[in-house]
Each structure stands twice: as C-alpha cells, then as structure tokens.
Image (tube, helix red, strand yellow):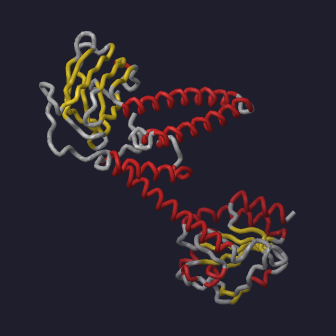
Amino acid sequence: MMTNYLIAPALLAATLAGCTGATPQQRTLTAEIAGAGEKMLYFDKFVNNRPTHVDSVKLDAQGKGEMHLPSMPLDFYSLSLGGEQIMVLLLDSAESISVAAKADSLQSPAHIEGSVNTALLHGFFRDSKAFDEQSQALVARLKADRGDTAAMAEYAALNATFGQSTRQFIQEHMGSPAVLAALNRLNPEQDIALFQQVKDSLRKTIPHSEYYTGFRDQVDRMAQQMAAAKQQEEQQAMLDNLIPVGSEAPDFTQNTPDGQPLSLSSLRGKVVLIDFWASWCRPCRMENPNVVRMYNKYHGKGFEILGVSLDKTKEAWTNAIKQDGLTWKHVSDLAFWNNAVAQQYGVSAIPYTVLVGRDGKVLAKNLRGAELEAKLAEVLK
C-alpha cells in the first residue's frame, strides 16, 4: 500500500523496545482482526522502505489486542501479522487509534477511529480501489470490442472525474502526508505545480521524516528535468527557425572522401535529403538500412542523398560508408560537432535530416523511417 513517493526513512536512532504499560507519554493502539485469533500482531516503523518491528501483541481468541506505543512523530507506520499484507497507519505523537479488519484483507480496514490522517489515507485508498475496478471493467469491454464508443466515452469521463477528485483531495488536505498517496495517481509533468505545493506544505508537518526528504528531493529533480527539457525544446525551436520549412536551403560546399569539393547547389533539380550523421553515432548506423532501402527505391525517380558526416577522422568515416553500403554522395570537414554545415543548419543532435525540393526549398526536417518514406512517396509520385 505504500506509494512510490514514500521514500525509505533513516535507521532508528535508538532501539525501541516493547512496552509493558501505559504512561502519559504513550499512545494506545487497539486492534480487532477477524480470523487472526492467537496470532502475533506487529506494529512497525519503515526502515529502508521495509517494515521493522517496534512493538507487538499476541491477539486473543477473538483476534483482539492492545499495544501501548511510545511517543513518535507524525509519520508512516504499519500493522502486520508477520506476512506481506500490511495496514498502513499515519500516526502523530499523541493519537491513540482503534482499528478493525479481516486477516485476509489487512490492507483494507473496516474501521478506523482516533487518527485523522490514517482515516484520510484509507478513505483515498477505498476511492482508488473503486476507480480501479470501474476502469478495469471498461478496459475489458474495450478489449472485447474496440469499437465500443460508449465504453470509450465512459472511460474518458471516469479518468477525468477521478483526476479532478484526486486534485481536490490534495488541495483540501494539503498538510496531511496522506496526500502522497494521491500524488502517486497524478502525472508529475502535468501537475508539477501541485507536487511543489505539497512539498512546501509537508515541510511544515513532517520536516524531519525521510519520507518527506525523499519526496522533496524527487520533486526537485523532476522540476529540474522538466526545466531542462523545456530549455532544450526552446533551443531546438530557435534552431529550427534558422531555416524554416519553405525557405531556401542555404548552399554549402565541403569535400567528398576523395578530396573533391561538392556543393548542395550542384544537386538542384533533384529531391535531396541532407543526412547529418557520423560513424560513431549508433542511432545513425541503426537508421542507415532504412535510408539505403529508400535510396534504392526512389533514386531512379530523382531522389538524391547528401550525407554530411560529423566524424573526426577520414578512416572512420569512409569505413562506415563502406560497411553500411551508403552509395550516395558524402561530404565532411572532419570537424566533429564543429562541422560548419551542421552549425549552419542548427544541428544539435544526430541523426538529423533536411529534405530539399527540386527548387532548392526546404520541404521537411528531421524525418526518418515511415515519415520520411511517406514524404518521399508524396513528392516523387
């Protein structure tokens, strides 16, 4: 039942022994577990994301028992019968809690009293379970009949409603660690602002919990990654705007493998694919068989390829041409990422392609595989 955002806490600072009697600093945990008569019930703290026993009680014949727990800070704890099933608890230092459940469904308690945060957590778990059951039923209908538009509409509406109620749950209970379970149902890329809001609110309620520090660090990493991705997209968009589709493809001249200068303008009248690649670029080499196939298919219809290599040595460049059977035209200045044509065309990653029409204008950019073949079929009818 632990969510992906409940990161493992640190080892306990001191060993916590079982208690023998209630004191003013203790809290009481009363349990009734149907079907667990005479079994041991364990109260656990999570250490390295695994439950570690803090206290225990042997249940009576009716599955009832009571523990007197030491005062510990608001955090995630659990009850178990020593197996894989656990009941997650969210207790603070003063709460006494009463729970009831069945031994075969410990993770879904029938009764919780005395702990607001635990009740919130399991209330959300119940709502999530109901959503999952409805969702699975609709998915089954769609698998049986992909044309079931009613099921498709119901599925979309169900997801939208659950997403809205999940966000509402988080907003209404912002200071409770229970919202971590709800966040696990959302997409960080779409709701990063909400993740950051929760991070700020939990700093006030569980600042010393490693659940919080792990979650905080994860949110910070996600935010940094998203900011970096956005910056990269903006940079690529800026580079793409250097030579927009429909504009004249800038002319250039570089040397072929035999040292002869070759210009893009010398190929005017043909549909030319400027293919930026390198012998050391694995994705380029993996794409080459597809490019060879298209060259063989369309070359007779006026299709030409001009490979621009970002290699550093002639030997590596020419060996790759031979190994991959690249029988079209090639040029390079062997300047690696400083290749003059690559910089002129704003190339920031390879493989990268620019498709130029018979009139010398850019038809498309960065097409590969099926997209490139479809475009060639369109322009070389």
Count every numbered label the image shows and give the total.
Answer: 0
Q: Where is 158 relative to 102, above or below?
A: below
Q: Residue at x 73, y 29 (%)?
A: 150
Residue 105 seen in the current view: no
Q: Who is closer to the viewer here, 8 or 71?
A: 71
Quadrant housing the N terminus: top left
Res. 82 image quadrant: top left
Quadrant housing the C terminus: bottom right
Q: Residue at x 37, y 43 (%)?
A: 6
Res. 103 image quadrant: top left
Q: Residue at x 62, y 79 (%)?
A: 342
The image position of residue 360, as x and y in percent, is: 81, 78
Q: Where is 159 relative to 221, above or below?
A: above
Q: Where is 57 relative to 379, above or below?
A: above
Q: Who is closer to the viewer here, 92 or 34?
A: 92
The image position of residue 289, as x and y in percent, is: 65, 62
